[in-house]
Image (spheres, rainbow, N blue to C red):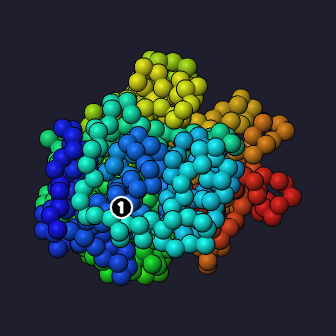
Amino acid sequence: MIVNESETSAQRTYIDHILERWQQDEDAEALVQGAQRLTRGEARLRLFRLGHALRRQGLAPGDGVGLFLANRVDSVLVQLAVHLIGCRVVFLPPEPGPGELAALVEQSGARAVVTDPVFAQRAAAAAGHSVHAPVLLSLGPCEQRCADLLALEAECPAERPDGVPAPGPDEAVTVLYTGGTLGRPKLAAHSHRLYDVLVDLAEGAPDDSRPAVFRTAEPGTDRVLAATLLTHGSGHLTALQALMTGSALVVLPEFEAGAALRVLREERITATMFVPPMLYALLDHPECEPGALPALRRIVVGGAATSPSRLQQTVEFFGPVLSQGYGQSEALGIAAFGADDLASAAVRRPELWSSCGRAISDTEIEIRGEGSTEALPAGQVGEVCVRGKSVMLGYYEDPERTAEALHDGWLRTGDLGYLDADGYLYLVDRAKDIIVTGSTSDNVYSRVLEDFLLTLPGVRNAAALGVPDAEYGEAVQIFLATAEDADIDPDKVGAAVTAELGELYTPRKTVLLDRLPTTKVGKVDKKALRAAWTSETVGATP
């Protein structure tokens, strides 16, 4: 069969870039998940068929398509297919409850929802509450009344769908869920400019200002593991950066440290991305030891604050392979620290272990005071504000929240930090996570406290919260996940904190746990900790 791959508009998109990679060496592996292994040629033809299958559901360019998907190869292809036909991707992550999920589907205006069979019941309930009455499609057979998209795909032609207009400069092409209030979710909407950044990174950087964490000197030589959720920014960017560099993408269905180690070893993974709790679990696994993963060249860590001591442990185990990235749903790329730069710079300046790098190409960072539009001097803590191509258009169909977050193209991130004289960014807290305590209502930065706690023997993970206090408004409470054989005395922990950070940081209460709860994204779930442990009567260690 002759495959039509002519460009359908004068403007090349990131999809064109991936397809160009997939036309070269068509027998090379493109997508892998366990026994499922697709070559570049097979992936390209399946992508075209999925595009036609989606169109046959009445979808037109500009329509929203909700993706309620688990980590699997088919999920990667469906996301690409939605963009291939000019539709808007709406990521529906698994963590929202029924009411929030229904509100997300409704607010996004999704014309269709594609669900993994394991989520089908929840997807059907959410779609049923939407006045838009979206079409419900499943990646395979399921018990709900929805069409099997994979069966429909098999009946479609393996030719690229034509007639797809170029996206407009202010057209939302991807929407990511980023919290909000009950029944009123925040949906960060991005234009094609975000993907232009990824194409630039894949094609190479003219100077050191453009660190590309998955770029290689010889495109196509990497094997990249997608371990974080594909419906979140981290997994989405990991997958696309791999495909645009011609790398093989290996998808991990669920993260478990032992399973991840096996896949990293057996698939000869050269690059991956973890959020901090994933990295910590890997380092703590008994099979993880120096030299265990000789093929590994890059580990990108991001998505939450990372302990400097754990970063150093990673380098001790795997060598100078560690990169850091900083972004959020509203600005998926803000700052980065390449592995070579981090390994060499931190030797000269150990404080750089606490930095998340410098601004990526075409991005500006300023630190501003509350309510101010003026940049603070180097070294002063304030809110991180950012401007660049990776910044969202705004919150989808939410002008009020957009006006609060965006001013003259600058995004107020809600993160607190400072820049040093060389432009390195250091984060100290989320604005909402600051603990205001003490007789003079001073700030306790949870990131600073958590970093110190992770240096203590036997502490595997740590979280700090502010809990209600009659005298000071808030008091510091800490939660420690400890090693099995660790004998930790909460009083000694408190004394160590006081000695290192001062009395303001002294915890009122220390809670010892086998592990800390995490969200579906793998971050420490402080909301769950707060709900379970703020009561004085619930099993805390005094």
Q: Is residue 200 visible?
A: no
Q: List x then y, in percent, for residue 192.
A: 33, 39
406 or 104, which lies in front? 104
Asked if 296 appears above or below 173 in the picture, the reply is below
Asked if 530 appears above or below 169 in the picture, the reply is below
Q: Which residue is labeled 1 in the image? A: 50
Q: Is residue 149 visible?
A: yes
Residue 385: image quadrant is top left
Q: Amino acid at mark 1?
A: Leu
Quadrant of the drawing holding the C terminus: bottom right
Quadrant of the drawing holding the N terminus: bottom left
Residue at figure coordinates x 61%, y 72% from the top left: 143
Q: Is residue 166 left or right of residue 117?
A: left
Residue 240: image quadrant is bottom left
Residue at figure coordinates x 51%, y 47% from the top left: 111
Q: List x then y, in percent, for residue 329.
A: 47, 43
176 or 364, which lies in front? 176
Mark 1 closeness class: few <14, some 14–19, many ≥20 residues within 10 Å: many
Look at the numbered disc 1 and give the secondary structure of its residue.
Answer: helix
Residue at figure coordinates x 54%, y 32% from the top left: 397
Residue lying furthest right: 537
Asked if 373 appears above or below 264 in the picture, the reply is above
Q: List x then y, in percent, for residue 441.
A: 70, 31
Q: List x then y, in percent, for residue 349.
A: 32, 46
452 or 389, which lies in front? 389
